[in-house]
Image: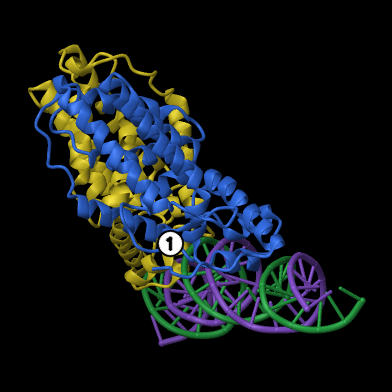
Chain colours: A blue, B yellow, C purple, D green
Amino acid sequence: MDVTTPPPLRVDAEANRARIVQAAQAVFAEQGVSAPLTEVAARAGVGIATLYRRFPDRADLVAEAFDDALRQYEASADLALTDDDPWAGFVGLVERMAALQAENRGFTHLIQSVPLGRGSSTAARGSSGRRELGSSGRRERGYRTVVEVIDRAKSSGVLRADFSPEDLPVLTFAVAGVIETTRDDLPEAWRRHVALFLDACRPIAATPLPPAPEPIALQRAMLRAARRRQTRGQSG
Amino acid sequence: MDVTTPPPLRVDAEANRARIVQAAQAVFAEQGVSAPLTEVAARAGVGIATLYRRFPDRADLVAEAFDDALRQYEASADLALTDDDPWAGFVGLVERMAALQAENRGFTHLIQSVPLGRGSSTAARGSSGRRELGSSGRRERGYRTVVEVIDRAKSSGVLRADFSPEDLPVLTFAVAGVIETTRDDLPEAWRRHVALFLDACRPIAATPLPPAPEPIALQRAMLRAARRRQTRGQSG
DNA sequence: CAAGAAGTGGAGGACCTATTCCGGTTAGTG
DNA sequence: CACTAACCGGAATAGGTCCTCCACTTCTTG
């Protein structure tokens, strides 16, 4: 797939492209990925048509705009695995993920928008035009590391045995709900909810739980949510 | 305030009014309180103008449409207080509240839309035209009971001492986030998150927590969220 | 049963965003 | 420097929702 490399852009076009991505980062961070594209174009100082020519699909723009954030996610997972204390690593990971969501409104959307393993829009083009690891690949690798962090914590006995990797995406949805509602007036409210969640993760707190979500269904749910966000805005 | 009772409606108007409320219940439950009012009107079999004449403000319609749900909330709290086992009462309350959110998409919005103590749109009119306890009053009484449930559980030593009544509204936001994302593909996913939350509520799980939200700021956040939902839809 | 007050429906104006079209502009090349 | 392919910006088209206005209909009452 993708045997032909796209022709390089004219230098002015490449510059505009970069400015669009930069503007998108700012706008999406503030308003989420459903922000009006006209605003992205305006902030980039280009016409709306230019934006559409370069990114026919909003998802393409999103994927590229959040490459940095995704890198941080990846780094967070790696860092967690590095920690000598498996519990501290797990806690740090969970807290950093939530913090990323709080800092960057679009991160929540991204982490759901690019689930593990898709086919299309995988290759992102860097500012130089070289091919790089796409968002999808990055997200996938990140998730694999997360699973390792969880496994390590479980086998060290510091994380309850019935904890499931699928619990983290669900926490992501929950944190998104808290942040969405409290962003302006209680920007730190999510911390306490996360802290409670972490208390529940210790073996000593364990009581029987309802079954963890089916991974495939979870993925479907995330995809559907992403699609919803994309479709929205064009109406209500 | 409100010294003059509004004149009674014509019988056909009263019938239409009832049909609008009924339609609103169904539509809001399915789509949330930001659902297009044209759909409510259509399902009620009346013109859009009729709806607006009777409910100039969307919030008025919401308050009345969810009177039943609010009654269930109140009943849930009462029931929890009745339970012999303070812990079982608390657990039941939390689970029922989340279940109400899952069943009725608008409930989440309502419980945030009518916070403790406002002034206006307090008096709802029953189908007979009599004045009744308004949504606001109902919600306020319900919340008082919730606080009692929490206090009882804490003084019995079955609920961690640093638990705060404000943690429940925040849980509501979190559950809303989970349900919003998983409704179609994992309709039961919220149960596990709630179960984890409950595990965290036991004294044995307690570790130091970040401070609980300021009640006044929490209320502001809820109001703002309600306003956001109201303003939305007219654009994006 | 005949005013006339009360109520009704749907068209229309105001917003907002997405997406395309096209005449004008500019970087790159020989 | 001249020419062309690539590029650009903004206007225009296409939805979708909110809310108001107004000519028409239907209860109610004397």
* Side of A221 relative to A62 (left or right): left
Along the line of sight, the residue nearer the viewer: A52 or A134: A134
Along the line of sight, the residue nearer the viewer: B205 or B64: B205
Which residue is at a point 47% across and 27% down the rendered structure image? Answer: B217
Along the line of sight, the residue nearer the viewer: A150 or B165: A150
* Side of A69 relative to C24 (left or right): left
Whether residue A223 is visible? yes
Along the line of sight, the residue nearer the viewer: B223 or A7: A7
Image vertical order of residue B106 relative to residue B89, above or below: below
* Residue A113 horizontal/vertical position (percent): 39, 53
Q: What residue did someone put label 1 on?
A: A121
* Residue B52 horizontal/vertical position (percent): 47, 63
Image vertical order of residue B184 relative to residue A146, above or below: below
* Side of B28 relative to B53 (left or right): left
The type of residue carrying mark 1 is Ser
- Chain letter of mark 1 equals A
* Residue A143 horizontal/vertical position (percent): 31, 42
Which residue is at a point 58% across and 68% down the rendered structure image? Answer: A7
Which residue is at a point 35% across and 55% down the rendered structure image? Answer: A225
Image vertical order of residue D14 relative to residue A143, above or below: below
Which residue is at a point 46% across and 50% down the rendered structure image? Answer: B229
Does dot 1 land on a helix, a strand or a loop?
loop
